[in-house]
Image (cartoon, helix red, strand yellow):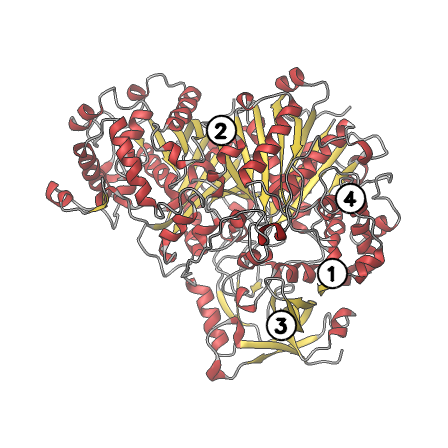
Amino acid sequence: MRRVSIVGIGSTQFRPETPEKNFKELMYEAASRAYIDAGIDPRKDLDCVITSSEDLWEGVAIFDEYVPDQLGGVLKPVFTVGGDGLHGIIHGYMLIKTGYFDLVAVEAHSKASEIEDIDKVYRFALDPIYIRPVVDQPHGLAALEMMNTMRLFDITYDILDMTIMKNHLNALEWGSTYARIFDYENIEASEYIAQPLREVDISPHTDGAIVTVLASEEKARELTDDPIWIDGVGWATQSGRYERMLHNPPVALNTAANKAYEMAGIENPFKELDFAEVDDRYSFREPASLSMLRLDGGNLMEMVSEGVYTLDGELPVNTGGGFLGNGYPLEAGGLMKLLHAVKQLRGEAGSNQLDDPEKALVSTRREIPSSSYAVVILSR
Amino acid sequence: MKMNINFKNRVACVGAGMTLFRRRLQETPDELMWLAAKTALDEAGLTIRDIDCIVFGTAPDNFDGIHMQSEALADGGGAINKPYTRVFVGGGTGVFSAIAGWWHVASGLCKRVLVIAEEKMSHVQPHPQYLFHHIFDPVTEKPLGVNLIWIFALEMHRYMYKYNISKEDIAKVSVKNKRNALDHPAAQLGAEITVEDVLNSEVLVWPVQKLDISPVSDGAVAIVYTDEEGAKQLTDEPIWIEGVGWSLDTMYWTNRDLAFPTYLYYAGKMAYKMAGIHNPRKEIDFAEVYDPFDYKELHHMEGLQLARKGEAPILTREGVTERDGDLPINPSGGLLGVGNPIAAAGLMKVAEVFWQLRGEAGRRQVKKDVVTGLAQAWGDLMQVGTVIIMRR
Amino acid sequence: MKPNNPMGNPYRMSDIEEGRLSYTEDYFEVWYRWSLGKYLGKYLEGLKNGVILGRRCRVCGRIYVPPREVCQYCFRETDDWIDVGDVGRVNTAVVSYIQADRTRIDKPLIIAVIELEGASEGMGILHRLGDVDPEDVISRRIFGKKVKAVWKPPEERTGSINDILYFKLVEEV
């Protein structure tokens, strides 16, 4: 079976506002970096370009018509996934596996700052008959999800506080504008948005773009001596009804992960993985994801208090600082996590660098009210 | 019989199903998805439990008035704790979702895939056209009050100018397709009309008149793919996916050659290469080309190399593209006759190729013996071509 | 005959208006503040000053209008600003009797793609034509004819594509 690898990745900085560039210029900046990183000429070499987006994040209808020029994809196979950037990676992976594509670029970006009232966009994602009349903004639903998640997985505020502090600390290295050095007083001072959800539990929005270049094994060998391999992928949607999700654990994450583990030949993920980048759009999502991904060793509280998930721990999680530390870039979320993982595996993570990591997991979930998960296993 | 030896994992279509296409349907979008999915699964002899993965196609996000609409509709497609994604390339999405389904199986990752395309346009008030206002560049075009029919009319007029084509010849496409649709059980606008009816219909944006355009519709279509092994267990008559291709041109449509669909030429080339086709005019037995406007059928035939530049109107005039002709085009009745629920209309074309190749199209069955068929769609800002080639 | 048993329950608007069917309604209103970026901003500034600006790629030599940040052929940033002039030729034109929401208008609009003379061949922009007989459009006599921009008075310009009122013919049809 031909393997698939990541041979290039490039991104803009992630910042709360980017008024100096329009979305095309942001995409172009990320794409130029990715293509230089991969050492390719997109006009000659690229076989396909994938973007991940939704129209209302952009404010135009049929967004995919705006993408080919700034990604070098004019008159090439280009398409858009209505999903997270990591879903885009999975489509690229499958395209290369068919044997007909050798080089595929995957793009995702956020211009969240240009949406004047983003809560109205979230409101529009909710069911118009059952939910909109009752709850009309996402954090209210997140609070319900939090209540349930804390109960199902025995998550305490201690776990959440440690998670928040850890991710912010990790993000400092990435030059994130959001990263703070928290102490317990800072966290205690945080106000409730909707009890039990506090302001510190929420990742703020950020702008930025990321482009990744995937290659077939033969092509990767031509381009680089140390490609990052994609060993397994999995994706699943739990349900279209968010209210049904609320009193169940996120089993679809488990479904997605099991598929990825099986492909990668991983039996004991906690032992075999060297680090993981998982969803932390809301603080409680990180411990819950770790449980569903079988990375909690059966006792979450113990693991967290022993510092297993910190940079010095046995299984560092969100080594790049995650969304809590860097901000949440809408559909580019999965690619931001992938970027952090690739930098670690390449040994380019600066003072966050782990000691010679070989295998990593990246997982993400789309924004509320979605229950679509994606999981990718990487190795060096 | 020809067989694609390049494929590692061959992909077969084993079932298709659709809802009625109508101006307004009472069913919700997820109910439409379910109806189409259920009939396709029944035809394949499978249930949702047998399906590994679901691919969903819908064109612009907001006809349903729901942001991230694919997530909200997951249940309608049976995507409960299953891999599920939505892909889109504007109006080309219908055929494109079939292409996406192909790579799910061809990659070896999935064995049985359900592809669903749904569009419910009747939600938008006062008229679905209004939503299309938002597809234009907000800086250089939207302030001019641009609408979709303008730009198609501009393209049509350029095409007529370049090859000196008459409105009469273009109207023949509308007449043919609406007549073909009389034999389609799901059709919205099957009718016996004349060229004069088209030429006397309301002028919207000259040269586009009311009967030059396909209607606004609600509807859903689904097809089922399996790998080679699965196909052999399920049916004696699998239809193989032999080639796929798509291509997206620059978004600056006013900088393009409007008389020839370059994007489709590239998309066709990719699909023909994959299917080992060197002379499309000889080797493609019939085609379902995208016809939201009557001139587009002609334009697309030329882009697909099924006719030389400027030759498609002549073939139409000579009856070559009729069901009993040498190169039947849109035997289903196309978008002009069956209806145009955007993404669903594209997948309807794939379903029609499937039924024609199996000889199950009944009164719509083309006269000649057919082995290789092609379905194509088009979309975005007149910039994307999507092509799929199927063989018996 | 396939398709087998296509299902669905059609209805008419009158079913809703006369209360036979119930429905729920909602609308979407969100403001987006799109950054113009380096190039479109300058383009609009040019329009305010009565100049149509394009961008040239020095590698392939193409001059793009509207100006682009990236050359679609070379995948590199374009190099120079070029004043492409306000005279061009009609690439294609149509007569519109409807507005964006498909309602009819009394006085038909003439819409055209105009290839500006200072830009590369085939580089057109979308705009209106004024003082044109619809018959010349319908007969396609107007195709290829020379047109020139008619600008708003400088004090009324806002930095918009609408700072050009329309293009008018400057040669006999």
Q: Earlier in the sequence, mark 4 or mark 1?
A: 1
Is disc 4 on the same chain as disc 2? no
Q: Badge 4: few (under 14), some or many (20 or more) residues near its Cα, within 10 Å?
A: many
The residue to which callout 2 is attached is A217
Circle 1 marks a residue in which chain?
A: B
Circle 3 marks a residue in which chain?
A: C
Q: Is residue A204 left or right of residue B8?
A: left
Circle 4 marks a residue in which chain?
A: B
The residue to which callout 1 is attached is B209
Q: Are marks 2 and 4 in contact (CB under 8 Å)?
A: no
Q: Position of residue A17 (x, y in %)?
A: 32, 56
Q: Secondary structure at mark 3?
A: strand
The residue to which callout 4 is attached is B306
Q: Residue at x 62, y 17 (%)?
A: B229
Q: Badge 3: few (under 14), some or many (20 or more) residues near its Cα, within 10 Å?
A: many
Q: Badge 2: few (under 14), some or many (20 or more) residues near its Cα, within 10 Å?
A: some
Is disc 1 on the same chain as disc 3? no
Q: Residue at x 78, y 29 (%)?
A: B371
Q: Are marks 1 and 2 in contact (CB under 8 Å)?
A: no
The residue to which callout 3 is attached is C128
User: What is the spatial separation of the Cα atoms under label 4 and label 1, in whole angstroms?
Assistant: 26 Å
Q: Secondary structure at mark 2?
A: helix
Quarter residue B14 falls in: top right
Identify which amino acid the numbered label 3 is placed on: Arg
Q: Height in image: B216 above or below B181?
A: below
Is disc 1 on the same chain as disc 4? yes
Q: Residue at x 40, y 30 (%)?
A: A376
Query: In this rendering, which labeled residue sits more in front, label 3 or label 1?
Result: 1
Q: Is residue A54 visible?
A: yes
Query: In this rendering, which labeled residue sits more in front, label 2 or label 4?
Result: 4
